[in-house]
Amino acid sequence: MMEWAQTLNEAILKYQTEDNDVLIFAKTLRNEIDEEFRFVQIQVKNTIKELLKMYLRGKYPNKHKSDIRDMLE
């Protein structure tokens, strides 16, 4: 169990500067943010994705939906 915890901690330290989800997980483990914050983060990500989709549809009105989806990815 100690090895698992140590490995998890090392991975968090390694990736928390590269991945926001890992940083949020680390802050939740350290009780620096509320556990429910992840739902706020998910909503923000979804809102940004929808806004970007609307922007791309406006910029490229003749592109097919699948092309817009590919651009989002």
Image: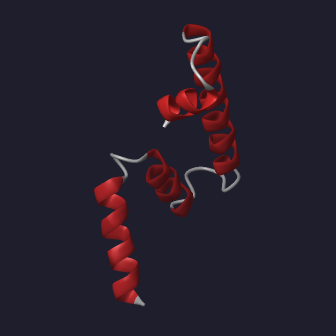
In this picture, residue 72 sits left or right of residue 49: left
Identity of the residue drawn at 37% across and 61% down: 12
Residue at the bottom extreme? Answer: 1
Residue 48 image point, x, y percent: 60, 28
Residue 7 image point, x, y percent: 33, 76
Identity of the residue drawn at 45% across and 55% down: 22
Residue 58 image point, x, y percent: 62, 10
Camera-nearest residue between 52 and 37: 52
Identity of the residue drawn at 28% across and 58% down: 14
39 up-or-down from 6: above or below: above
How is colour applied across the structure in the image? secondary structure
Camera-nearest residue between 13 and 47: 47
Q: How many marks?
A: 0
Quarter occupied by the N terminus: bottom left
Camera-nearest residue between 57 and 29: 57
User: In which quarter of the view is residue 44 placed?
Assistant: top right
43 up-or-down from 56: above or below: below
Identity of the residue drawn at 37% across and 52% down: 16
Residue 50 image point, x, y percent: 66, 27
